[in-house]
Amino acid sequence: MPQLAAVEKAGIPMVLLIYGDQEECFRQSARLAGVPRMRTVHVSRTLPGPEDVDRFIGSLMDALVRPLTDQEKQRGRWEEPDQRFIFTGTTEEAIDFFSRTEIIPSLQHAPVSRYTNGLPVLPPSEERVKRMLAGTSRKPDEIITFQTDHRIDDRSVQMGRSGKKGDPVLFLPMKRKATVEKVAAIGVMAGCRPEHMPVLLAMAEAGGGCNDGRGGEFYVIAGPIARQIGMNFDVNVMGPGNPVNRSLGHAAELMWRNFGGEIPAVNNCGVQGSPLQNVIPENLEALPPGWRGLHEEYDFDRNENVLISFRPSSHGQNWQSSQFSPGGYRAFQKSGHGGIARRLGVKGKPGAKNWVEYLLPGMWTGSEGGFTFLMHPEMAQHLYEAGFKTKDEFYEWLYRKSFMPLSQYRTHSWPDVWTNAWNGIERVSGKHWKELPDDALVPAMDDPYQNCIVVTGGGEEVSVWGVGRTMNTDPAYSIDAWK
């Protein structure tokens, strides 16, 4: 939208082709970009392309040449006043107030919570918010800003995040700002404690669960603070039970609703949405010798505390469980027996083995990019014993394994975008995409560090894997900076 708005403001007629069910989302975005009455023409989701063009071409040409009305000539960015909500009444009345919903016509008249993510919350009284603020040295009225320069790519900048130190964080989709006091209020609502405030503030700096406006953020905490505040590192690390893991995830969703102003089918046209936000710790004490923690991968010290943001459902690849049973995995590692051993040709052979080899056939069947592994400590140790003495060695190995023939890469959907419709340069060979033969080998990821290992969890052997990171769009945020 920022690029479209710039063209429109330069005097070049613009008409956006959109689906009818996205009209409200488009209007909200256009309003924020300062072109609230940009013209649209609705296209079909189902009609064949030529038939659909014949249907809408007349409306498109009319919208392009029809003179602008006085209302359409108006410009300016709408900004919502930064209000401080103070509720006066009994606790029961406060609970009722924060449980209010509104009916959304474009959501088939379904109710949507006005202040929450749909779950019960603790009313943020003055006293509770004051206690929460004791967890940080920052002043209540301080605006949340970037505490250091972050390498954020053009796509994220277009969505309202400069990434520059000192610039205010704009919470999407509505590009609102927030103060330290508002973060404290969110912490109270989510059931957090004062010692969680530095984590909550770092989470707010990271976008508050609403990075690109569609939600679905996944946060990992690396550093000693995870144990200090009582996070769960072991069995059920992503499940219910631990109040710290869950309340922090709850807070991320409340930031998305209250700071970002997210409303499904109004300013967020995500399809199915995402499950409850997850905030989990990395188990630094369980790392194999020589393996760096996540914060060290981002050039922080081992004793520093950082929060890393991931987007597990981007690029069309959702989190998946590994394709083997715990019993089969144990048989494979202990004695070289079972289906995993048979597939890898190591049946009956003792010694350490690389279990990721078993997963390779399914890893780039329909998608591309790196992978983030949530890996139990025992499985990380097995990779170490199989020869990966550092995470970097594993990342490099997986990068090499991602190479595939160009004829296979062309059958993927996203490369049409990544390669500029195949009119760009393939970076490994340095040649134009259209000059490469079908059997030319090209990587399914940009670089080895799109891969990521998070050692966490426990119990039966299982690895959960999903979309990898991109350092420019999945940066690390200092927790210590907010103490």
Image: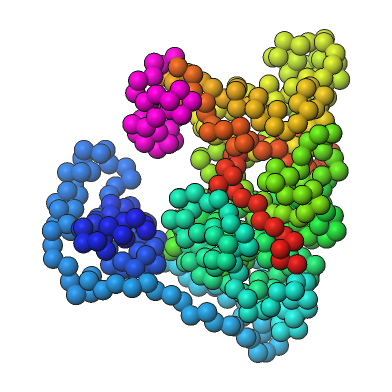
- x, y percent for residue 410: 41, 25
Residue stretch in magenta:
410-439
- The single residue placed furthest to the bottom in the displayed view is 88
- x, y percent for residue 161: 50, 59
On screen, 296 above or below 7?
above
- x, y percent for residue 235: 82, 45
Q: Quadrant of residue 6?
A: bottom left
Q: Who is closer to the viewer here, 386 or 318? A: 386
Left/right placement of residue 8 relative to residue 414 reads: left
On screen, 262 above or below 399?
below
Q: Magenta stretch: residue 430 in it? A: yes
- Quadrant where the C terminus is found in the figure: bottom right
Q: Quadrant of residue 71?
A: bottom left
Main secondary structure type of the part rendered in magenta: loop
- Quadrant where the N terminus is found in the figure: bottom left
Q: Quadrant of residue 329?
A: top right
Seen at 37% across and 65% down, the residue is 33
Left/right placement of residue 245 relative to residue 475 reads: right
Q: Give the colouring mode of the picture.
A: rainbow
Q: Magenta stretch: residue 9 in it? A: no
Seen at 39% across and 74% down, the residue is 78
